[in-house]
Image (spheres, helix red, strand yellow):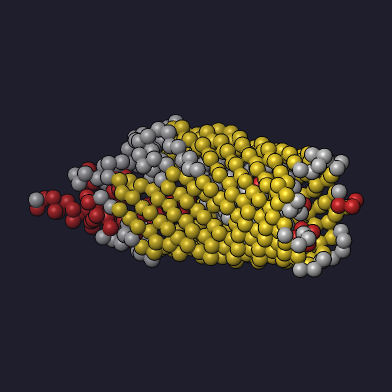
Amino acid sequence: MAQRQNCLDEMLKKIRIIVGRNHGCARALLLGSWLAFYPVSVLSAGIAVMEQSVKELGQAFSGAPTNTEDGSMVFFNPAAMSQVRGRLLSMAGYVIAPSITFHNQASQLTPLVSGAPLTGHHGGDSSKIAFIPNVYYVHELTDRIAIGIGFNTPFGMKNSYPSDWQGRYQALDSEIMTLNFNPSVSFKITEKFSVGAGFNVQYLHTRLTNAIDFGSICSLQVGAAACASQGLLPQAADGHNALKGDSVGFGYNIGALYSFNDNNTRLGASYRSRVSHDIHGHSNFSVPGNAVLMTRGGQFVDTDARTSATLPDTVLFGLSHRVSPRWMVSADALWTHWSLIRELRTDFSSAQRDDILDLKWRDTWRYAVGINYSSESNKWIVRTGFAYDQTPVSSAQHRSPRIPDASRYWLTVGLTYAVFKNVHLHAAYAHLFMPDTGIDHRGATGDRLVGHYTEQINIGGLQMDWRF
């Protein structure tokens, strides 16, 4: 018994010495949890949510910058609100059904521990069905001035892996939700040219979980022999971390719309500003009994955490042209400033020091084209579209299991039905094709997740527009 206590004391002494000299392993573990603030969305590239209009979903959002027919103009281009006569209410909901599956190839522990293969379930399926609503209201004040309000989700994601999958030390549950309140105003300068602007109040909530390999941490910090005597073996002494955080940020959006040829051809452009978030969160740890001594230096204890992050600004350009009374074509291009997310700096209230996690995201473009066909009575409108959406993830080494993101190809169809002259219903469906995506990502304890993802996404939506 005395020999066992001497061993424990010696381990604790070593841990305190190492922790005092270098917080790297534990610090990286907590920082790895905050990495999920930037996971792949199951919607658009990065964590952006394009789903702001079911009408526009039907044509792959190719007409969004020039759209004057539903309330999503509040979000996509507030200048178009001046085209609304009377009042317009748009309400929409979307069901997102992804299939995102990991296929293991050579995942292993760091050679500094053993280099052994990562144990657990071979196929981590992170699929999780999600529902997204949005509401917009536009009100004509005069024949030149209109105001609008939007409630939507401009960024977000949700996924979950089995608790026993091979990448459990890097990701289990990841959830990000933003709620955006967007009052706007539009002014028609001439009969052909309008401008608009809006103000954004954005709430962000995040919940992230992952397992912790205390066996590997002990071996790295103290030595395999001393840890083995206490049962702290790699992948045999798992703990758990859950992190929640909240923030409120502010931004703005502006837009312009120009109409040619009796409104048959329109050009639109808009800008949405970046939104800075000062995220305050709390990290809760579950530590196995034989690893409790590793918390005595102030590591792996429940603590407050804080990080600053900036969600990107965007620039949107678009063109629509009515070829004939029944046919219309549209195209747009969206630039997103994802390179703002190059690193993540986190501050902990416990003994953890600040640190920086390198993400290396890059700016992206999204291109879309679409076509509309109207029935002779204008009772029905059928539309379809195609889009190419680049991923901001720069390499397999920077692709986290929380971010199994890949460039995607959108193929969409939609339908509009005029129930009454002032009430329109929209339905749309989109399938997103994504090529197999490689991952070679190292976790906080040096574990290496190697394999590839197969992904596809299905999106369906319904919307009602009511003019009164």
- Quarter holding the C terminus is bottom right
Tell me if 226 is positioned left or right of 235 in this view: left
Q: Nearer the viewer, residue 181 or 276?
A: 181
Q: Residue furthest left?
A: 1
Tell me where residue 416 appears, x and y as whole percent.
Answer: 71, 43
Q: Nearer the viewer, residue 468 or 258?
A: 468
Q: Nearer the viewer, residue 406 or 78?
A: 78
Q: Is residue 201 above or below residue 373?
A: below
Tell me where residue 191 appears, x and y as whole percent.
Answer: 87, 61
Quadrant of residue 146 within the rendered picture: bottom right
Residue 67 in view of the camera = no
Tell me if 242 is positioned left or right of 456 in this view: left
Residue lying at 53% horizontally and 40% vertically, measured from the top left: 97
Q: Is residue 125 above or below residue 250?
A: above
Residue 201 in view of the camera = yes
Please tell me how many numbered marks the rendered image carries.
Answer: 0
Q: Residue furthest right?
A: 261
Q: Residue furthest front?
A: 420
Q: Nearer the viewer, residue 88 or 222?
A: 88
Residue lying at 56% horizontally and 44% vertically, measured from the top left: 95
Residue lying at 14% horizontally and 53% vertically, measured from the top left: 6
Tell me where residue 225 appears, x and y as whole percent.
Answer: 22, 43
Tell me where residue 224 appears, x and y as whole percent.
Answer: 26, 43
Residue lying at 66% horizontally and 36% vertically, measured from the top left: 411
